[in-house]
Amino acid sequence: MFSTAFLDLPALQGSSGTVTLPGSKSISNRVLLLSALCQGTTVVHDLLDSDDTRVMLTALRQLGCGVGVANTTVTITGLGGQLKHQDAIAFFMGNAGTAMRPLTAALAVLGGDFTLSGVPRMHERPIGDLVDALRLLGCKIDYLGNDGFPPLRIGTPTLKVDAPIQVRGDVSSQFLTALLMAFPLAAKEQDIVIEVVGELISKPYIDITLNLLARYGIAVKREGWQRFTLPAGCHYQSPGTIHVEADASSASYFIALGAIAAGDGIRIQGVGADSIQGDIRFMDAAAQMGAKITSGPNWLAIQRGAWPLKGITLDCNHIPDAAMTLAVMALYADGPTTLRNIASWRVKETDRIVAMATECRKLGATVEEGSDWITVHPLPNGKHTHASAQGHWKAASIHTYDDHRVAMCFSLAAFNATQVPVRIEDPKCVAKTFPDYFEALFSVAHTDANHIPVICIDGPTASGKGTLASRVAQALGYHYLDSGALYRVTAYAALKSGLSLEANDEARIADLARTLPVRFEGDTVWLGQEDVSDAIRTEQAGMNASKVSVLPAVRTALVALQHSFQRLPGLLADGRDMGTVIFPDAPLKVFLTASAAQRAERRHKQLISKGISTTLNSLCADLEARDARDSSRSVAPLKAAQEAYQLDNSSLSIEASVEQVLTWWQTKQPF
């Protein structure tokens, strides 16, 4: 997951490959709570690992459930409808509506002394209609802040189930879901009837609830979408094991990607057209816009069909979450797209109608909005641009409102015909449902290498370029290439293979270097399955690296290997010739200029702190010798690139140096 302040997406051009989706958030949190309410043990496979599910798991532990987690398999030892802990428990629900609403209902029916709170946005999300319905049942619930909104205090109920319980259906389907999941706990001697007042929105989410309730032994009688009856004497029965479908809402981004981007198409693993999730019907809307979609057991395949896409008008009541993706697809259409019946967008993680309109306008689009609708006009899409396209594509920094779906939707804007980049602010917000979303996107998106940004940081030995480069890479979410480590690893591998580091073994060392299985993971350097981080960071390893670096055939062999590190979303490369030889077209080049004496003093402090005995004079002499050797070699001598920014970091902290490089980088961005 990217935990950076922002993530810059370069202009993307096509897509191909396979994506395996994480489990459904809606199914995951329902299954967790249902398993907790059962007697006995339930093994849940393919559970989504996200912020929302972690909130629910924490709450279940607080209630005394047994919870065992092994990757995406979770074992829940249920409560059998009886709480083990009922006294003064405070639950923090974050911004997880799929945890807050059902847990509120279940705890209110079971009774105890509980408080439920969340992040500030959760305290702005209405819950009054659910509370009103529960109070009709005899539940004791008090508001601790504004009426109609969390936080809540729950007490011990005096249950009354003789009359139908009414709940509004036009605000959130989660209210009805919460009641359907909680009321089996109270249906001991007589039926419990729930009546929906007004139109029920997001009906497919109620289908998910009813389907799962049946898996847990609760057969709800449904009369249209207005009346639901839980039979007297019903009780939860564990299915023993249950598998969570992949998230159909998450599939929408990759269905859209296949429709938008040229290439061989996208295959989605984990969910098919027969999914129990309503958002799978997004595929029908995408097909209306021109996507070519085929499906099989647990998979979808998508290719671009009509281009540009076709503008549509659609009632989106049945796909409220996935419909957000249509608003970005609309930018690639041949005419305006209007999405109707989306009032629920206003009470989600943010006011999504306002958010989608605001951010589409930043990209250059014309947008109209109403209380429960939005119209998005397309932007030019190359030679296929339709006359109705308005405005032009603009590079934009997308504010994500701590809303995972806003972040994922607008990543698709990076495929624009004008080839301008897109910045996604706070990319870690996708952790709510799809922590590895951007990694999945980059695994199937592609673009020309010249669109993938590279920052080069060059400088002499012991100038601190490795530390600086890795910190800048971390700040930007870029890949990191320590070219010096490549030479160190090459020397290490050569010696391990019984080769000398001299010209007579140059060809054999070069052959070895071409297929060096090296990778960088944070501060760890791997050679195949061997962690060589410590072995290559000795003084001797540094001298060995200098020896192999002067061998022309070895340097040539390592060029292609270094180029292979240029991957989405970008690369931070440090070394002695990154800006002059390996990436001469890099948009930012930095050359460190600390003197040998200053570098020796730094190195001396490092070695002494590690208990290694040395002297300043010897270190300085060694560094001067290495500088002379590196500067005078015939191939790629150490020197600053003509356009490089000179950075004397002698008296700068690492934080100040990082800030300076990031400032230089920002001056080159269009945001």
Image (tube, rainbow, N blue to C red):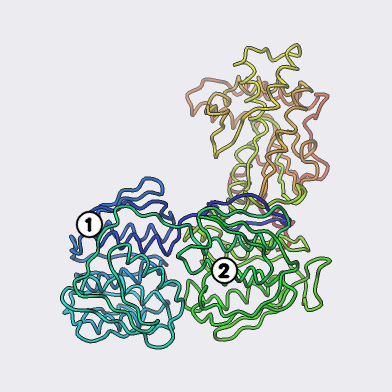
- Using the image, determine if residue 8 lies above or below residue 495: below
Residue under label 1, please give it.
Answer: 64
Whether residues under marks 2 and 1 lie with C-beta atoms below 8 angstroms apart, the answer is: no
232 lies left or right of 597:
left
Q: Is any atom of residue 508 visible in this view?
A: yes
Looking at the rendered structure, the secondary structure element under dot 1 is loop
Rendered residue at 26%/85% (across/down): 164
Which quadrant of the figure contains the C terminus? bottom right
Residue 591 horizontal/vertical position (percent): 73, 40
Question: Which label sits on residue 477?
Answer: none
Q: Is residue 123 left or right of residue 278?
A: left
Q: CA distance from mark 2 to mark 1?
A: 39 Å
Residue 115 at x, y percent in the picture: 27, 70
Disc 2 crowd rating (10 Å Cα; few below 14, some 14-19, many 20+) is many
- Looking at the image, tell me whether mark 2 or mark 1 is earlier in sequence order: 1
| Above or below, 615 relative to 287 | above
Q: Residues within 10 Å of mark 1 (few under 14, many from 20)?
A: some
Rendering quarter of residue 506: top right
Q: Nearer the viewer, residue 178 or 236?
A: 236
Q: Position of residue 483 (x, y in %)?
A: 68, 33
Provide the residue designation for mark 2.
282
Residue 146 shows up from this direction: no
Residue at left 55%, top 27%? 532
| Secondary structure beneath label 2 | helix
136 in relation to 605, above or below? below
Say whether residue 166 is left or right of residue 263: left
* Amino acid, disc 1: Gly
Give the residue displayed 76% in from the left and 22% down from the top: 550
